[in-house]
Image (cartoon, rainbow, N blue to C red):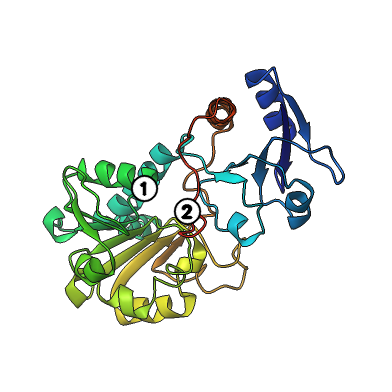
Amino acid sequence: MRITVCLTDNRPDPWIEGLRAALPEAVVENWTPGAAPADHAVVWAPPQRFLDEQPGLRGLFNIGAGVDALLKLKVAPQTQVVRLDDAGMSVQMAEYVCHALIRHFREFDAYEAEARARRWSYRKPRERQDFAVGVMGLGVLGERVAKAVAQFEFPVNGWSRSPKQIHGVGCFAGESQFDDFLGASRVLVNLLPLTRETRGILNRDTLSKLNGGRPGGYLINVARGAHLVDDDLIPLLDSGQLAGAMLDVFNVEPLPARHPFWSHPKITVTPHGSARTERDISIRQIAGKIRAMERGEAVAGVVDAGRGY
């Protein structure tokens, strides 16, 4: 069995060493143009040439949760694209979202500004019931986030393409229930995959429906920058329709130095670090899936190219 590794902008050596240890029966090598045909590949942002030269791949394992960039390429029909189920990302994502939510709810950003000005201030506590949290996307990461938020006794809603049932979460599904979901949620957390249908879903129209259309909504985007229409966000913040936003992903990354998101007082920017792949966990998961595929067994995480995730 031969495994090739093609990781654009990532050091391949630690992955190769880890895969060799986890799969001693396999030949694991870094891909170079003209390399021998492989049975499986571990990739991040591979060039089209890589896929053109490896038409016989049975498994194509993406080291990140999002596969939107990979699906833009031409992949051989018999190649199964497999994404990571979790790889340590769900707990990180839950931490990030809970931090963003509580920072906004408890007005810690305002306390920080007061402290910098050396002012001793007090802010009246706000009611959790007034800050319903809506999680868009109820996959592995979204479900973990929704359950974590519920532990802090916020009302929690969830929206997904197909119906889900999660204890303690008010679940909405499909286009017919999307507006109801938005109206019932004051804080919106985006964890959707990026597809043709979801590109630009965070826009003036949808964001204005938060909180029943009343001012005060808040956005946390930890999915993909292309979900958000950048030009629609700042007018909503300036008018007070949205109280703020915490953004970890952007249409252009790194975020350009002159981009207005950097300086807007109601926007908090982080550099696409809400959840990072943990290599050792990922290698164990990939190795297990490769062995299962070699035995002819089905594996979790196979991407449906038609749906885009």
Q: Would residue 11 appear left or right of 65 to someone viewing this image?
A: right
**Of the pair 193 and 152, the residue shown nearer to us:** 193
Task: Choose the circle earlier in sequence order: 2 or 1.
Answer: 1
Pinpoint residue 215: horizontal percent, then vertical percent: 22, 75
Question: Residue visible at 47% across and 53% down?
Answer: 309
Circle nearer the viewer, 2 or 1? 2
Under circle 1, the secondary element is loop
**Of the pair 52 and 94, the residue shown nearer to us:** 52
For residue 110, which quarter of the picture?
bottom left
Determine crowd level at label 1: few under 14, some 14-19, many 20+ residues with C-alpha closer than 10 A.
Answer: some
Pinpoint residue 281: horizontal percent, then vertical percent: 53, 28
Question: Residue visible at 47% across and 48% down?
Answer: 274
Residue 11 seen by the camera: no
For residue 144, which quarter of the picture?
top left
The N terminus, quarter of image: top right
Determine crowd level at label 2: few under 14, some 14-19, many 20+ residues with C-alpha closer than 10 A.
Answer: many
**Residue at the disc numbered 2:** 309
Residue 221 vertical position relative to residue 38 in the rendered view, above or below: below
Residue 139 - label: 1
Name the residue type under label 2.
Answer: Tyr
Q: Are marks 2 and 1 in contact (CB under 8 Å)?
A: yes
Residue 270 vertical position relative to residue 65 in the rendered view, above or below: below
Q: Would residue 191 appear left or right of 284 to someone viewing this image?
A: left
Pinpoint residue 242: horizontal percent, then vertical percent: 30, 73
Pinpoint residue 59: horizontal percent, then vertical percent: 61, 39
Residue 56 seen by the camera: yes
